[in-house]
């Protein structure tokens, strides 16, 4: 029987870290050669990390889950652990943008690129995210989310040592082309994808795919140091999101579970 992703072990890794510290047109563009810095404009500001936060607002996310998800990012970005990781970077600053997504052509930027270089700018970012109205929309297109996220780095105004897309969601890609097509294109551009699969049973009896963590590992995430943190209980949202942000900003990765050699063949269909 497969051992599920251990949130406890991942949170322990996060605690240790804290202590140490656009729409599909029917075709796909050729993969972009790997680059270190996406925005090469002369006025681009050097930062340690450029972070795109891509948040699922599909109808399968109930209002309480949406609130917990957003609150998790808000508290994570303003936490003491996050500030410690921020100060530990070469530049001591990051750039972040936050958008919500659902169907193939349904993406909305809630907060454009912002610089975080200390508590005051982190509070301003948190307040901007918190003030945005909530919304829900049909379908779940991770393909659309990643396709929308990729070009956001090109004119961000920042030169990041690391470029990361942080994608959260409670279901598999159910609209648009297979997600691995755009995943591979994003990775070819030198961008890392991390995942926050939301795997909770709901009060009305249904729940997310029991293998959503495997789906994210095999079909969605990738790049240097990529990882997932699976959320299985509502109470885990805040701490899991904070841990994920700290690891991303510190350039660290939680301990991965060991997969036996006989299980290294594809574990799940990405189609």
Image (cartoon, rainbow, N blue to C red):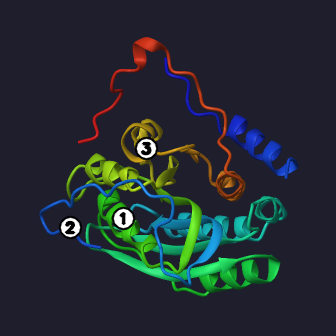
Residue for point 80% across, 59% down: 88
Residue for point 23% across, 49% down: 178
What distance separates the C-alpha of mark 1 from that of mark 3? Answer: 14 Å
Q: Secondary structure at mark 3?
A: helix
Q: Could you tell which of marks 1 and 3 lies nearer the N-terminus?
A: 1
Drawn side of residue 36 relative to residue 17, left or right: left
Q: Could you tell which of marks 2 and 3 lies nearer the N-terminus?
A: 2
What distance separates the C-alpha of mark 2 from that of mark 3? Answer: 21 Å
Q: Could you tell which of marks 2 and 1 lies nearer the N-terminus?
A: 2
For mark 3, does the 10 Å Cα neighbourhood hold few (<14), some (14 to 19), or many (20 or more) residues?
many
Q: Secondary structure at mark 2?
A: loop
* Quarter occupied by residue 51: bottom right
Residue mark closest to the camera, 2 vs 3: 2
Drawn side of residue 174 relative to residue 50, left or right: left
Q: Which mark is residue 24?
A: 2
For mark 2, does the 10 Å Cα neighbourhood hold few (<14), some (14 to 19), or many (20 or more) residues?
some
Viewer-proximal residue, 123 or 91?
91
| Residue most extreme to the left | 26
Q: Which mark is residue 145?
A: 1
The C terminus appears in which quarter of the rendering? Answer: top left
| Residue most extreme to the right | 19
Q: Position of residue 211 (x, y in %)?
A: 42, 36
What distance separates the C-alpha of mark 2 from that of mark 1? Answer: 11 Å
Q: Which residue is mark 3?
A: 216
* Quarter occupied by residue 121: bottom right
Drawn side of residue 164 relative to residue 211, left or right: right
Residue for point 73% across, 43% down: 11
One can see residue 58 in this view? no
* Quarter occupied by residue 33: bottom left
């Amino acid at each position: 029987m497969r051992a599920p992703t251990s949130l406890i072990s991942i949170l322990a890794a996060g605690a240790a870290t804290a202590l140490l510290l656009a729409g599909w047109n029917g075709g796909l563009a050729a993969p972009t050669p790997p680059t270190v810095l996406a925005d090469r404009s002369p006025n681009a500001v050097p930062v340690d990390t450029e972070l795109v936060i891509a948040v699922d607002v599909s109808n399968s996310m109930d209002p309480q889950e949406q609130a917990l998800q957003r609150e998790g990012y808000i508290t994570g970005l303003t936490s003491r652990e996050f500030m410690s990781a921020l100060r530990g970077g070469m530049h001591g600053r990051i750039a972040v943008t936050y958008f919500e997504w659902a169907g193939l052509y349904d993406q909305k930027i809630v907060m454009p690129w912002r610089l975080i270089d200390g508590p005051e700018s982190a509070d301003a970012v948190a307040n901007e995210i918190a003030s945005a109205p909530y919304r829900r929309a049909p379908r779940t297109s991770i393909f659309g989310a990643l396709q929308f996220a990729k070009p956001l780095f090109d004119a961000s105004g920042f030169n990041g040592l690391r470029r990361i897309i942080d994608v959260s969601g409670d279901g598999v890609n159910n609209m648009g082309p297979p997600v691995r097509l755009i995943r591979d294109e994003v990775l070819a551009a030198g961008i890392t994808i991390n995942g926050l699969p939301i795997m909770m049973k709901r009060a009305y009896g249904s729940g997310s795919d029991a293998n959503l963590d495997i789906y994210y590992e095999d079909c969605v995430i990738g790049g240097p140091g990529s990882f997932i943190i699976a959320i299985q209980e509502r109470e885990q949202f805040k701490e899991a999101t904070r841990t994920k942000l700290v690891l991303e900003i510190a350039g660290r990765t939680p301990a991965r579970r060991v997969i036996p050699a006989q299980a290294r063949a594809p574990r799940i269909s990405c189609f």
